Image (tube, grey):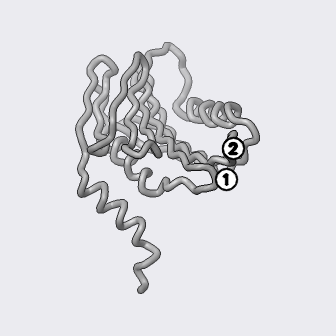
Amino acid sequence: MRFQPFLPIIASFLLLGCLGSQQYENKFKGFSTVYPAGWSVYEDEVRVVFSSPNGAAQLIVFSTYSNSSASPDNVTRSLSAQFVKSHTDIAVINQSSRNIIVDNLNASESSLHFSYASDSGRIEQYSRFAAFSKGEHYFIVLLNVFSAPGEKPDYLGYDKTLEMALSDFKIL
């Protein structure tokens, strides 16, 4: 069957399509977006965390004000460096970056797939994030996908979650 290699990707599209999405709006943090139905939402002073039901993935939106003139590209480079520094015995599997548009604003997007040592074995993590600002209001939209020790993270299906959130992201 020639479509068999694409079945996991097709299943991810169908799963997201069947479950649908929910609208999220926070006027205090100054944005709205969508997230998959069934995910939980946690808020604190600077971020909103959307978590998958199985805990394997998180979509995090950071919202802060700063008079810094840091470009989105500098922000994503700094975040990548912080991810690497925050773990011991890290091995970078893949890293990439590109420029995108979010709510008609220039944004920088980076992805980082790495493994690191834990007490229970090596863990793989996939992080993909976009940074952008409107004036002094800065946003970082981050997707983290975790795996159990010795397993690979199922990030392909969750990548669509980030793409959906970014395509619907609006600064209020």
Q: Residues within 10 Å of mark 1 (few under 14, many from 20)?
A: few
Q: Is residue 154 visible?
A: yes
Query: Which numbered circle lies on residue 116?
Result: 2
Type of amino acid under label 2: Tyr
Residue that appears at 41% across and 86% down: 1
Mark 2–mark 1 Cα distance, whole angstroms, equals: 10 Å
> Residue 62 in the image: x percent, y percent?
44, 26
Q: Is residue 11 above or below residue 62?
A: below
Residue at numbered disc 1: 93
Q: Is residue 152 left or right of residue 88?
A: left
Instruction: Locate residue 85: give its quadrant.
Output: top right
Q: Which is more N-terminal, label 1 or label 2? A: 1
The quarter holding residue 152 reads bottom right
Q: Quadrant of the C terminus?
A: top left
Q: Is residue 77 left or right of residue 34?
A: right
What kind of residue is marked 1?
Ile
Residue at position x 52%, y 32% in the image? 72
Residue appearing at x 33%, y 35% in the figure: 40
Foreground: disc 2 or disc 1? 2
Spot occupied by residue 4 in the image (x, y as percentages of width and height):
43, 78
Q: Is residue 77 above or below residue 54?
A: above
Q: Which of these two is toward me, 130 or 127?
A: 127
